[in-house]
Image (tube, grey):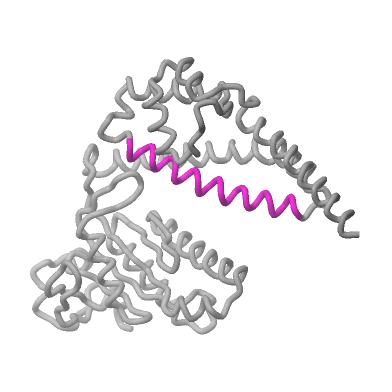
């Protein structure tokens, strides 16, 4: 009985391996027929340049005699050479841009592979299902990825041209960190699937609120989300909405705290850097559960009165109320001034 089961298991693995070979040929366009030296020779790119490119993209290292490449790899190297000659992949930006490509697509591919594998394993014939998915699903996924990329490219271009910082890597904006309160204890109460659903719900709800207010989610870091919005008022509204939802016992949104800072931000490859980002992070660590802390830059932007911030401990301006906190020293910032932000009249 065990021998028969082992034989069936080996047969299943053989079938699945054959199906995966079919998928690989579909994805790469051809069966591998070239070594890395042959690819470089056909593309007219030095081997050391190609190796550095593949390493930054995160591709696995191939031995000199490994037949692991296809004509698609030749075309990719030719395109890379063209972009370098056009100055798009300059020496200054090449490494960071290529690494970002590699990391982004590796994460996307990992998630998509897991998704398709789960679907295939639910079929009575996983090997056949893998092959069917390759021909039916992947072309649509590829087309959607191109569509999403083009739409984001158009949006990014419009933001850049509409702003006052066109051509600059620095722009004034509001930066917000939102952190789940009690994440560690809650994660211990959930099984793996439940934890994934809970975090995905949090990320989805945050993303919807941010996008609805004209902002962009920069990254999700486990139990924390980082987003930016051009206008401090919109950022404050999002942060206060999130903390209010987290304090509502009838809302599934988790309890959170937030830190909001406003000022110049360095924009690089879809990420944000600089003192404004650091201050927003520090404020989040200081905030009590269910509260939003803002820095001097955000306070002045929200009150439109930079000379008034030291005159009153508690005051309202427009839709917002402020309570000045005692100055606090945090890592990198001595005597950081912060205000607790609330809705006016609350």
Name which residue lies at 29% across and 42% down.
162
- Magenta stretch: residue 115 in it? yes
Q: Main secondary structure of the magenta part?
A: helix
Q: Residue furthest front?
A: 3
Q: Quadrant of residue 34?
A: top right
Name which residue lies at 25% across and 70% down.
282
Q: How many marks?
A: 0
Left or right relative to 324: residue 49:
right
Left or right relative to 132: residue 51:
left
Q: Residue furthest right?
A: 1
Give the answer, above or below, for where 126 lies relative to 150.
below
Residue 96, position in %: x, y? 33, 40
Q: Which residues are magenta?
A: 95-121
Q: Quadrant of the C terminus?
A: bottom left
- Magenta stretch: residue 188 in it? no
Residue 173, position in %: x, y? 26, 55
Query: In front here: 306 or 183?
Result: 183
Left or right relative to 250: residue 223:
left
Q: Quadrant of residue 336?
A: bottom left
């Amino acid at each position: 009985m065990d021998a028969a089961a082992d034989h069936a298991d080996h047969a299943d693995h053989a079938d699945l391996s054959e199906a995966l070979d079919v998928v690989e040929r579909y994805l790469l366009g051809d069966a591998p027929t070239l070594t890395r030296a042959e690819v470089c020779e056909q593309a007219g790119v030095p081997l050391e340049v190609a190796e550095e490119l593949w390493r930054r993209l995160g591709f696995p290292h191939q031995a000199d005699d490994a037949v692991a490449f296809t004509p698609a790899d030749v075309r990719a190297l030719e395109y890379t050479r063209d972009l370098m000659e056009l100055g798009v992949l300059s020496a200054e930006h090449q490494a960071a841009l290529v690494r970002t490509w590699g990391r982004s697509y590796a994460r996307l591919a990992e998630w998509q592979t897991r998704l398709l594998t789960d679907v295939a394993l639910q079929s009575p014939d996983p090997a056949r299902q893998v092959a069917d998915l390759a021909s039916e699903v992947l072309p649509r996924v590829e087309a959607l990825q191109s569509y999403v990329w083009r739409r984001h490219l158009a949006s990014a271009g419009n933001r850049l041209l509409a702003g006052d910082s066109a051509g600059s890597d620095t722009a004034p904006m509001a930066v917000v960190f939102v952190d789940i309160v009690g994440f560690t204890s809650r994660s211990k109460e959930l099984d793996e699937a439940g934890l994934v659903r809970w975090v995905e719900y949090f990320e989805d709800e945050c993303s919807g609120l941010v996008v609805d207010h004209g902002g962009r989610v920069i990254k999700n870091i486990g139990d924390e989300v980082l987003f930016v919005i051009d206008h401090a008022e919109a950022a404050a509204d999002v942060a206060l909405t999130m903390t209010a939802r987290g304090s509502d016992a009838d809302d599934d949104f988790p309890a959170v705290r937030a830190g909001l800072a406003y000022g110049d931000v360095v924009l690089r490859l879809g990420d944000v850097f600089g003192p404004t980002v650091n201050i927003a992070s520090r404020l989040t660590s200081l905030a009590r559960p269910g509260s939003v802390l803002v820095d001097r830059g955000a306070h002045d932007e929200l009150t439109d009165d930079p000379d008034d911030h030291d005159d009153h401990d508690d005051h309202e301006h427009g839709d917002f109320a402020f309570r000045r906190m005692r100055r606090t020293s945090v890592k990198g910032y001595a005597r950081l001034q912060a205000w607790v932000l609330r809705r006016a009249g609350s």
